[in-house]
Amino acid sequence: MRTLSTFSITFFTRKSRSNPNELSIYARINVMGKRAEISLKRCANSAQWDSAKNRGRGNTEKIRALNAYLDQVYGKLLQCHKQLLEEDKIITSDAIKSRYLGEDENSKTLKELITYHNNNMVHVLKAGTMKNYFTTERYLERFLLKKRKVNDIYLKQLNFRFITDFEHYLRNCRDSKKWLVLGNNGVMKHMERLKKMANLAVKLEWMNKNPFNQFQLKFNKYDRVFLNERELELLENTDFKSERLQRVKDCFVFSCYTGLSYVDVKGLTKDNIVKGIDNNYWIYTKREKTDKLVKVPILPRAWAVLEKYRAIQTIDVTNNLLPISSNQKVNTYLKEITKSCNIHKNISFHVARHTFAITVMLSNGVPIETVSKLLGHTKLSTTQIYARVVESKISEDINDLLKRFEEKRSKTISNC
């Protein structure tokens, strides 16, 4: 709401209690006869203050610096008045003072934004995703303390310089052994989360523009690790005397033939096993990550793993079909397993999902659209990341193409 009002800014002084020869300088904002005063935390000798001009008197370097500061304050107060007019806010002396001091409702801080985001997203995003946001928050706190020497900043201070400085800080973070903590993609993930929170601030009208508009996220592309047919067969045919390794191997093989992620395998119960329209057993479950319904036919090798642990399931109070350890332990045990099998690849449980998509499905001619459905992807473009075409498949497709050429040539000759 616009208000026609008288508006003025003046500077004045009061005698200092500690030093009678010094004057403390204040700014007075007057709107419609109502005043608000701001202490400028500046002092001047009484002989060096011009009461008529409300400025320092003289041409010394100290006086010139004082007058330049007063001009800067005057300009900022005018800018605050202009902003309130543009935002259709009620213009009062206290409103201008609050805007100048950064205490009004539009002067939100970075920590307020993070708190608002996390409180509102905790029931929307998965626990693993929220854990990543909390990690980004900790990095931001350390950056502010170490590099800016502050606990918080206003969102209006969140500019391109802040973004690039934070990126540089992340790239140079080291652990107790002086090793770099984050790779390029790890840094970009933290920057991506900060960008999303900045977008939220713009939507909430806490910021006028997103400082990430001029910043480009640059992720390095890596080939996805998977087991080829020989490696998968080698793993399947290796038995371990250690029960913990054998169980992890079985769960990993199960995932290689179902495409389920670690968290989906862990949550699998007998209620997820149903008979399909083809009279075969299927897994019906919701992906923990996307909450999307997934229907996966149980291939014979996956069914064999379920049958093996059926007896254990009857006494398992959690009702889980497979005995799987924590994700951290599973990934540690998988390194032991691959080493024993002479598989020289850095394997995590998620590699089973890649193996299902590439080695079990795509390499055997299953259409990418079908693979996308089985993986529970919401977009086909996501599946195309998995769709590495291995050399054997290229060779097979080219041989099929040559056969078709030969058949066409034979038909042409016979017709002649």
Image (cartoon, helix red, strand yellow):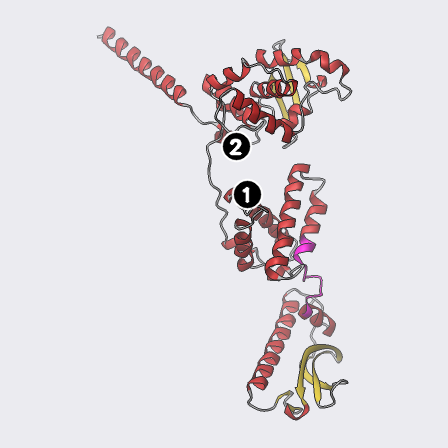
Tell me if I can see residue 292 in this picture.
no
| Magenta residues (range) | 101-113
In this figure, which residue is indicated by the disc labeled 1? 186
Residue 105, picture quadrant? bottom right
What residue is at 55 percent from the left and 53 percent from the top? 169
- Give percent across and percent down for residue 318: 76, 22
Residue 16 versus residue 110: which sits nearer the camera? 16
- Give percent across and percent down for residue 279: 63, 9
Q: Amino acid at mark 1?
A: Gly
Which is nearer the N-term, disc 2 or disc 1?
1
What residue is at 46 percent from the left and 38 percent from the top? 221
What residue is at 69 percent from the left and 39 percent from the top? 124
Residue 268, picture quadrant? top right
In the image, is residue 168 part of the stretch drawn in magenta? no
Tell me if I can see residue 280 in this picture.
yes
Secondary-structure class at tag 2: helix
Measure the C-alpha gap from mark 2 to mark 1: 20 Å
Residue sticking out furthest to the top: 414
> For residue 382, which numbered disc appears in the image?
2
> For residue 284, which numbered disc appears in the image?
none
Secondary-structure class at tag 1: helix
Residue 323 versus residue 112: which sits nearer the camera? 323
Residue sticking out furthest to the front: 177
